[in-house]
Image (cartoon, grey):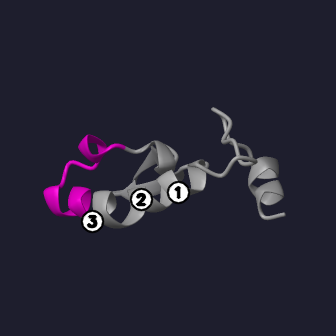
């Protein structure tokens, strides 16, 4: 929910939060398809929960409280 740092060729890249990703962000057709068919539906379902609103800037405290 906070994104992730990935290191490629000793260069760190900060990825945005996965629930904000769009297929065009992935730059690879097979990964885009995998994301659209398997990951994105889960995020959409989670976002429909009436008592669970994801803030624009997610912090660790929000993530920990969401497990409750």
Q: CA distance from mark 1 to mark 2?
A: 6 Å
Tell whether 33 sits left or right of 19: left
The quarter of the rendered structure image containing the C terminus is: bottom right
Left or right for 61, reference 8: right
> Which of the pair 44/3 is nearer the observer?
44
The image shows residue 16, relative to residue 64, as above or below, that is above
Residue 10 x/y as whole percent: 38, 56
Dominant secondary structure, magenta: helix
Vertical order, 34 against 28 (above or below): below
Residue that mark 3 sits on: 34
Q: Which residues are magenta?
A: 22-33
Q: CA distance from mark 1 to mark 3?
A: 17 Å
Name the disc covering residue 41, or none.
Answer: 2
Mark 1 residue crowding within 10 angstroms, few (<14) / some (14–19) / many (20+): few
Residue 61: x %, y % from top left: 82, 50
Q: Earlier in the sequence, mark 1 or mark 3?
A: 3
The alpha-carbon separation of the residues under discs 2 and 3 comes to 11 Å
Classify 10 Å Cα crowding around label 2: few (below 14), some (14-19), many (20 and above).
few
Question: Which is nearer the eye, 37 or 6?
Answer: 37
Give the labeled residue for mark 1: 45
Are circles 1 and 2 on residues that touch, CB within 8 Å? Answer: yes
Q: Is residue 30 left or right of residue 61?
A: left
- Report x, y in % for residue 3: 54, 49
- Give me the residue at 40% from left, 62% from top: 39
> Is residue 32 toward the left or the right of residue 35 in the image?
left
């Amino acid at each position: 929910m906070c994104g992730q740092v990935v290191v490629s060729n000793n260069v760190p890249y900060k990825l945005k939060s996965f629930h904000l990703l769009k297929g065009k962000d992935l730059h690879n057709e097979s990964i885009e398809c995998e994301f659209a068919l398997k990951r994105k539906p889960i995020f959409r379902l989670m976002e429909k929960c009436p008592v669970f609103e994801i803030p624009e800037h997610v912090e660790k405290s929000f993530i920990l409280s969401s497990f409750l």
